[in-house]
């Protein structure tokens, strides 16, 4: 068994080393978009490092590691499939143009190490629960957490699948996806992510890690105000003329009935 500090420091070293290695690959390929598919896998690594350091782990810790693995690998595999053959993402291409010859080293800090720090902090509930390794039997809070996690995974997975099917149809070029889950929220994938992390937090809190509430709060803030809804919608109206009407009748984040035009 290791202390919480040892668990946190070890995972910080591991995830920093992994992101640095990924930066070297991205620099050589001139495509830092490879950081996106690694996002989910990074959480899987953190979860199992924490589990290994504090084994034999309780059923709650094993549950957290397993649920994180299902979510993380699903996300990574989906992003790998979605991004194949598309080149560097427009966000990183814009950064590359802005920084010019400095981009190769600026990307280490502004993209890879920044994401490593966020990933490490957001995963505090998983790491803390593993270090505490509470022997308290799972109860209704754990059940609520698993239910919310499952609901979020459903929303995220189905939302991604529906959008990809829509985009694969050439007749939908330039049009706005407003069917399925996208009829009730403009960002079912981000809402699903939101539920996943609050579900994992509840399970961790049931094991004594309630103090890590700032981790899901940070993830919620990022999804709503930074790299999620706000960033995506900054330019989408310019690329899709019908998006303004879609915004007027559809909730931004929380699912709800369609509004009257």
Image (cartoon, helix red, strand yellow):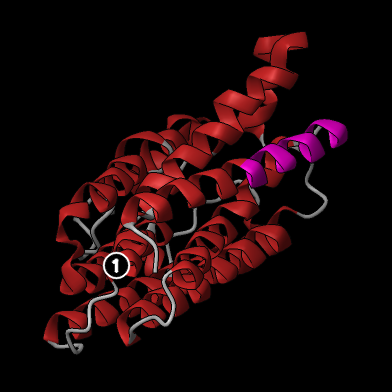
Image position of 4 (left or right of 141)? right
Q: Residue furthest front?
A: 1
What are the residue bounds of the magenta stretch? 17-29
Specify the quadrant of the image occupied by residue 257: bottom left
- Could you tell me which residue is drawn at 52 percent across and 64 percent down? 49
Q: Is residue 51 visible?
A: yes
Which one is nearer the viewer's eye here, 142 or 7?
A: 7
User: What kind of secondary structure does the magenta stretch mostly adopt?
Assistant: helix
Q: Secondary structure at mark 1?
A: helix
- In terms of depth relative to the viewer, which is nearer, 259 or 11? 11
Please, is residue 143 above or below residue 121 in the view? below
Q: Residue at x 31, y 36 (%)?
A: 225
Check the image and name the residue furthest to the right.
28
Give yes or no for residue 177 being in the magenta stretch. no
Horizontal side, residue 179 vs residue 18: left or right: left
Q: Is residue 18 magenta?
A: yes
Residue drawn 70% across the image and 19% down it: 105
Q: Give the image location of residue 151, x and y in percent.
A: 32, 77
Tell me where residue 221 appears, x and y as whole percent. Answer: 28, 41
Q: Left or right: where does residue 47 sit relative to residue 169?
A: left
User: Where does the image place residue 82, in percent across and percent down from the top left?
Assistant: 69, 59
| Residue bearing mark 1 | 129
Mark 1 residue crowding within 10 angstroms, few (<14) / some (14–19) / many (20+): many
| Residue farthest toward the left in the current orientation of the protein | 140
Q: State whether residue 252 appears in this view.
A: no
Quadrant of the rendered image containing residue 180:
bottom left
């Amino acid at each position: 068994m290791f202390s919480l500090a040892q668990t946190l420091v070890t995972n910080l070293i591991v995830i920093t080393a992994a992101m640095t290695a990924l930066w070297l690959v991205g620099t050589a390929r001139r495509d830092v978009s490879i950081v996106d598919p690694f996002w989910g896998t990074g959480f899987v690594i953190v979860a199992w490092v924490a589990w290994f350091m504090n084994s034999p782990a309780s059923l709650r810790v094993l549950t957290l590691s397993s649920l994180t693995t299902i979510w993380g690998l699903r996300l990574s595999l989906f992003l790998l499939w979605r991004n194949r053959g598309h080149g560097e993402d427009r966000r990183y291409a814009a950064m590359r143009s802005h920084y010019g010859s400095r981009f190769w080293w600026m990307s280490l800090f502004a993209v890879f190490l920044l994401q490593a720090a966020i990933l490490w902090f957001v995963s505090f509930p998983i790491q803390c629960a593993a270090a505490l390794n509470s022997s308290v039997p799972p109860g209704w809070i754990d059940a609520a957490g698993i239910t919310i996690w499952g609901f979020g995974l459903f929303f995220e997975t189905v939302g991604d699948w529906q959008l990809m099917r829509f985009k694969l149809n050439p007749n939908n070029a330039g049009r706005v996806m407003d069917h399925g889950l996208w009829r009730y929220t403009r960002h079912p994938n981000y809402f699903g992510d939101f539920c996943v992390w609050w579900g994992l937090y509840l399970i961790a809190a049931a094991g004594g890690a309630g103090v890590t509430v700032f981790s899901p709060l940070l993830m919620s803030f990022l999804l709503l105000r930074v790299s999620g809804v706000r960033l995506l919608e900054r330019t989408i109206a310019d690329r899709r003329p019908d998006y303004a009407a879609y915004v007027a009748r559809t909730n931004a984040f929380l699912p709800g009935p369609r509004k009257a035009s």
